[in-house]
Image (tube, rainbow, N blue to C red):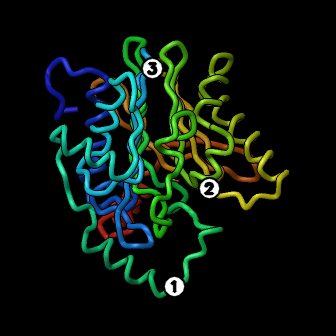
Amino acid sequence: MSQLHEGASISDAVQLAVMNVEDNPLFHSVGNGGLPNENGKVELDAAWMDGNTLNYGAVMAVEGLKNPIAVARKLSGKQRNNVLAGEGALQYAINNQFAMRNNLSSLSLKKWKEQLVIETNHETQEAYDGHDTVCILGAKNGEVIAGLSTSGLFMKHAGRVGDTPIIGSGCYADSDIGSAAATGVGEDIMKGCLSYEIVRLMEHMSPQQACTAALAQHQKRLQRSKNIIGSMSVIALNKEGEWGAATTKNEFSFVVGQDEGSTEVWISSCEEGKVSNTRASDEWLKKYADALKHGSGN
Ligand code: GLY
């Protein structure tokens, strides 16, 4: 990654990747340009986990930060007070000279005003096209890191917190095994602590098997309780750099990067309960880029 300085760590690479999305107003579910809650406020959640130490940090329901991931990473280095919410998180960021930004773009404001005239059903809210969080997993020389950031569900209740900053649900990282992260409807992801479950399963199986098994089992369990099940997608990376992904949707896109810049976009899909992952076609990539330009990016 050309923006990385010489000798940058895998943690620096993960943070930079998350920050690139937080800073990009074309993505409407993360950072700058994120879609607001029902009060028109862009409340952000972010999490960081270091697989070497099991240290974690998170901010939740906080407004006005430029890069919530940077604050989450900083909090992960502390012994106590690792997860800060709302006003307290903002105060900590201000006191520690983190950059601020009004993340409500004119496009997000427009979408919010349009949505105000439509009644939002909080009981059945869905993620944008099934996913809503930037989830970056990194592995290098046996060290694994997870970094996540989101503005959460559009028109969520003020103060609502999704799975992203809840360690074990939104992400988990243990350098003895690997890391996992989730995106989609946080309320349903949290019912299965999906990321922790996947990392534990990876002790005995490949990342792909772990993603597929954890998601299928969780979906089955939710169906048994007759829950209205929201979309959920997961990714995993073991300490050897093998990866996996699974989704409950018919399309979930993710990116796989290897050393020295080879980057591929993949699509995971689930049809009749069967998960498959395929490389994105040129046509798909063009359509995605066009959608971003026309303001419908996630
Ligand atoms: N998955 C992010 C959220 O539910 O807020």
What type is the residue that disc 3 sits on? Gly
The C terminus lies in quadrant: bottom left
Q: Are marks 2 and 3 in contact (CB under 8 Å)?
A: no
What type is the residue that disc 1 sits on? Ile
- Percent x, y of residue 181: 51, 37
Decide: few, some or many residues near mark 3? Use Cα within 10 Å; few <14, some 14-19, many ≥20: many
Look at 32% across and 79% down and name the residue there.
110
- Percent x, y of residue 253: 49, 49
Mark 2 or 3, closer to the camera: 3
Query: Counting residues from the N terminus, which is met first, the one under dot 2 or under dot 3?
Result: 3
In the image, 217 versus 72, the foreground residue is: 72
- Percent x, y of residue 230: 64, 58
Q: Mark 3 sits on what residue? A: 51
Look at 28% across and 29% down and name the residue there.
13
Look at 62% across and 55% down and name the residue there.
231
Decide: few, some or many residues near mark 1? Use Cα within 10 Å; few <14, some 14-19, many ≥20: few
How far apart are the two marked residues, 2 and 3, measured between alpha carbons? Answer: 27 Å
How far apart are the two marked residues, 1 and 3, measured between alpha carbons? Answer: 43 Å
Residue 231, numbered label: 2
Residue 118, numbered label: 1
Q: Secondary structure at mark 2?
A: loop
In the image, 298 versus 113, the foreground residue is: 113
Decide: few, some or many residues near mark 2? Use Cα within 10 Å; few <14, some 14-19, many ≥20: many
What type is the residue that disc 2 sits on? Ser
Q: Measured along the vertical axis of the image, is residue 122 above or below residue 230?
A: below
Q: Secondary structure at mark 3?
A: loop
Can you tell which quarter of the image residue 221 is in?
top right
Query: Counting residues from the N terminus, which is met first, the one under dot 1 or under dot 3?
Result: 3
